[in-house]
Each structure stands twice: as structure tokens, then as C-alpha cells.
Amino acid sequence: DAEAQSECDAECVSVRLLVDPTDPCAWWLQVKSPDQSGLLFKICEVLQSHGVDVCSAVLTIESGLVDNQFELKVARPSEVTDAADWCAELEDFLVKNRASGGVFLQRLLTEGSMAAASRKLHVNPDLLSVVSFRELAREEGPQEVAIHYHLEIEGINQAGLLTYAALVLCRCGFSVVAATVATRDGRVCDSFDLVARSMAAEQKLQSYLDVPPSRSRPAN
């Protein structure tokens, strides 16, 4: 019933923050949750709003449960005092969003234009480029199709870049099933394994990002 589902959602969602004992400005964040559309965007939005930089990240999904692991950097060790509050707020939001059928996140994902979003996030999309975008496989069933893609992007490091990229993917209709994020020498290199339910997602992506024309498709 609904009450049992709510208890299950609460048990499945967890937000844990660990501080490096040798470097109090280095943190590790783990967010586990049932898969929710816009999950990566919400996590990144919370981190950015509190001035927390993402150095690297790995996202995996197994049996419908998403495991997000982030290596973080903050300016001052004292910021850990506020971290307990926003970790609790993030966990509470994800539990309530799951119980609402994703209504809360959907409002965030559809609010305003992408131009407005880039200004709010202080991101210059022109500094972001698509290195590779290719279709990996296509599963066609009687009711729906699942198209698997691999996307690699890179650009000059900007605080809201990962948040912006996650928002673009959601608005296009992609689900992120795996991701690796790395920052090195002032540049960001991100790779995403994606699933879309129609070719429309690919077409929308081309309206937001400059996708190279040469793309490999799986053999028929």
C-alpha cells in the first residue's frame, strides 16, 4: 500500500558525507536512491548553491537503485557545519519527490528557458563541447523503444557546468544510467551512458549542444 511504499522509499534513499581526516576541505558524498528523473541535476544544484565544487564523480545504477559518488572540494573546513543541514534537506526532498511520483523534480526541470538556466547557473554553454556522441544499441518492444547512447563532453571548468549538462539531458528526454566526471588542469571531462525512449531526444540535444555530425551507429 501507499504507506508501505513510503517507508520503502525512505529506507532506500540515503545521503552520506565523509570528510577526509587529512584534508578537512576534501569531502566525499554518496547519494543512494531509487532512480528518479532529474536526480543528478538536483544533487548538483544543491552542491552548487552551497559553493561546493565537484572534483570527480561516478554514477552507477543497479536493480533500479542509483549510487552517486562525488569527490568534493570546499573553500573552508567550517562549511561542514552547514553540510549536515543540506544533506538532510536533500534526503528529505528525494524521499518526498519519490512519494509524489516525481512532481517536485519535474517542476524544477521544466522551469524557465535554458538561456535563463545558464544565466542562473553562471555557465557559458559556448565553453562546453561534445567530443563524442554515438548510439550503442536499440531495444524495440511492443510498447516502447529504448535507445542507448554514449556521450562525452569537455570544456573549461565552470562551477555550474555539471548542473547545466544534467538539466540539458533531462530536458531532452535522456535518462542517465552511468556517468564519470573528472576535472583536471582547469578542464572538465564528463562521460554519460544514456537511454532515450525516442529519436526526439537526440534531435533536442542537437538544439542545445553542437553535436559532431560523424557518429557511429550499431550494426543492424
Image: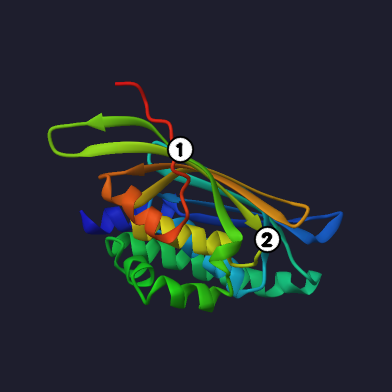
Which of 217 and 37 lies nearest the eye of the viewer? 217
Residue 66 sits above or below residue 55 on the image:
above
SS at mark 2 in the image: loop
- Point out residue 189 in the picture as x, y percentages from the top left corner: 63, 48
Task: Tell me if I can see residue 66 in this picture.
Answer: yes
Q: Residues within 10 Å of mark 2 (few under 14, many from 20)?
A: some
Q: Earlier in the sequence, mark 2 or mark 1?
A: 2
**In this rendering, would 43 be left or right of 26?**
left
**Residue behind mark 2:** 157
Q: Which amino acid type is shown beneath numbered disc 2?
A: Asn
Q: Left or right of 96: which side holds 159? A: right
153 w.r.t. 150: above or below: below
The residue wearing badge 1 is: 214
Query: Label 2, label 1: how many angstroms apart (C-alpha)?
Result: 26 Å
For label 1, count other residues whose C-alpha is less than 10 Å away and answer few (under 14), some (14-19) or many (20+).
Answer: few
Give the side of residue 106 with respect to residue 82, left or right.
Answer: left
Residue at the limit of the structure toward the top, as seen here = 220
Q: Locate residue 67, reporting x and y percent.
A: 51, 45
Q: Residue at x 45, y 74 (%)?
A: 115
Where residue 4 sits in the image (x, y, percent)?
28, 53
Q: Secondary structure at mark 1?
A: loop
Question: Quick one: 95 or 113, which is closer to the camera?
Answer: 113
Residue 202, relative to residue 47: is it above or below?
above
**Total numbered circles:** 2
> In which quadrant will I find the C terminus?
top left
